[in-house]
Each structure stands twice: as C-alpha cells, then as structure tokens.
C-alpha cells in the first residue's frame, strides 16, 4: 500500500513538474492564433477552427493563412457534397431544384478557387523579389475573394419563401458556415500580405 502511494505521489510530481513548459508552449501558440484571429470578422470561429492545428501553425503568419485556407477548402468540399445530394431529393422541384443545382456549381467553383489559392501560397518562396511576391499574393487574394463570392451567391439563392423551408434553411446554414471560415481565411491572407508589402 505504501509503495502504491509513493508511486502515485511520484507520478503526481512528474506531471506537474514537466507540464508548465509544455503548457507555456501550447499557450504561446494559442495566444498567437487568438491574436491573429483578431483581424477576422468571426474571431471566435477562427480560433475554434484553427487552434487544433497550433503545432503546425506555430508562430507563422503565412502558416496560419495557409491552414485557414485548408479549413475553408475542407468545409467547402463537404458542403458541396451535401448540396449535391439534395438534387436527388424527390420533393425538390422546379425553381427550388434549379437553386440547388446553381449552388452545387457555385460551391464547385469555390472549391476550385480555394484549391488554386492553397497551391499558389504554398509555392511562394521567401527568396522571391517583392514584385513576384505581390503578383502571387494578388492571385491568392483574388481567388479567395471569388470563392467567398461564390459561397454568398449560393446562399442568396435560398432567401425568401418556398415550399421546402427545411432544406433551404439546412443548405443556407451550412454554406453560411463555409462563407464565414472563408472570410476569416481571406482576412488572414490579407494580414500576411500586409506584413510583406
């Protein structure tokens, strides 16, 4: 019994003696993410969606922008798949069905543009001159902005009244969620760009 108590005590001290360093590192990365998210329109959502990637983001403005784009792309793909399944729902017809199909196209364009922006940002080298950097960043900003427009256009197709209000609300809620993380990603991209101009 005494030996068990001693081992428990030893384990207790080993955990609390080593954890402050680990916690400080984790806290520092979280503080960087929290501060960076302050430039976005949806800072709480930004922190929630990016804090799980703190080890990859570290203290890098470029990496946090890149990670935010990956989060946006992942969610856009998921929503595109969801909306695509809605085209096969029997109760959705006429103008409602056309709105769904248009949304699938919009989300497809959004996915394509986010993919391009991630590739462009990933290939940018610190060694490039200012003109090259600005050209590449302009492409990234244009594509992410266009992706956000695609997402907002999709939600506009489901405003107003219709017979299938439940499916409309479901699509609008999901696409709005993607638009919010894309908006945050654009803000972080712009913040990263501003540091280098």
Image (cartoon, rainbow, N blue to C red):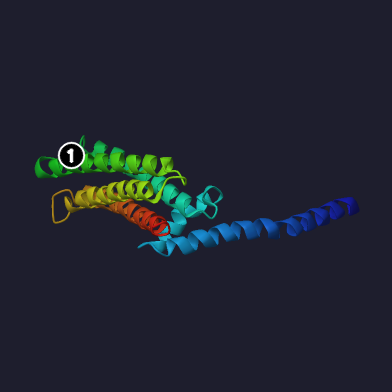
Tell me which corner region of the image, top left, top right, bottom left or bottom right, holds residue 124.
top left
**Does residue 110 sit above or below 160 in this rendering?**
above
Provide residue 30's location: percent of width, then percent of height.
Answer: 54, 59
**Which residue ends up furthest to the top in the rendered image?**
88
Instruction: Say which residue appears at 13% left-offset and 44% top-offset.
Output: 96
Provide residue 70's location: percent of width, then percent of height.
Answer: 41, 44
Instruction: Say which residue appears at 51% left-offset and 49% top-offset.
Output: 53
Provide residue 55's location: percent of width, then percent of height.
Answer: 56, 49
Q: Nearer the viewer, residue 172 or 48?
A: 48
Q: Secondary structure at mark 1?
A: helix
Tell me which corner region of the image, top left, top right, bottom left or bottom right, holds residue 188.
bottom left
Instruction: Say which residue appears at 43% left-offset and 59% top-offset.
Output: 195
Tell me: 118 left or right of 24.
left
Q: Nearer the viewer, residue 150 or 143?
A: 143
Provide residue 128's location: percent of width, then percent of height.
Answer: 43, 45
**Which residue ends up furthest to the right in the rendered image?**
2
**Does residue 124 sit above or below 194 in this rendering?**
above
- Picture quarter with the C terminus: bottom left
To which residue does mark 1 refer? Answer: 101
């Amino acid at each position: 019994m005494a030996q068990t108590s001693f081992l428990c005590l030893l384990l207790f001290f080993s955990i609390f003696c080593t954890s402050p360093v680990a916690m400080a590192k984790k806290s520092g990365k979280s503080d960087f993410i929290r501060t960076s998210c302050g430039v976005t329109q949806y800072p709480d959502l930004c922190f929630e969606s990016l804090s799980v990637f703190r080890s990859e983001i570290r203290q890098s403005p470029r990496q946090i922008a890149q990670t935010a784009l990956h989060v946006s792309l992942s969610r856009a793909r998921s929503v595109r798949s969801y909306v695509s399944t809605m085209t096969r729902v029997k109760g959705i017809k006429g103008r409602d069905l056309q709105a769904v199909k248009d949304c699938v196209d919009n989300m497809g364009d959004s996915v394509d543009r986010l993919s391009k922006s991630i590739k462009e940002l990933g290939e940018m080298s610190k060694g490039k001159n200012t003109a090259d950097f600005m050209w590449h960043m302009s492409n990234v900003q244009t594509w992410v902005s266009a992706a956000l427009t695609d997402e907002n256009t999709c939600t506009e197709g489901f405003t107003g009244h219709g017979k299938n209000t439940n499916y409309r609300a479901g699509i609008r809620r999901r696409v709005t969620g993607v638009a919010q993380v894309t908006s945050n990603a654009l803000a972080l991209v712009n913040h990263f760009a501003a540091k280098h101009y």
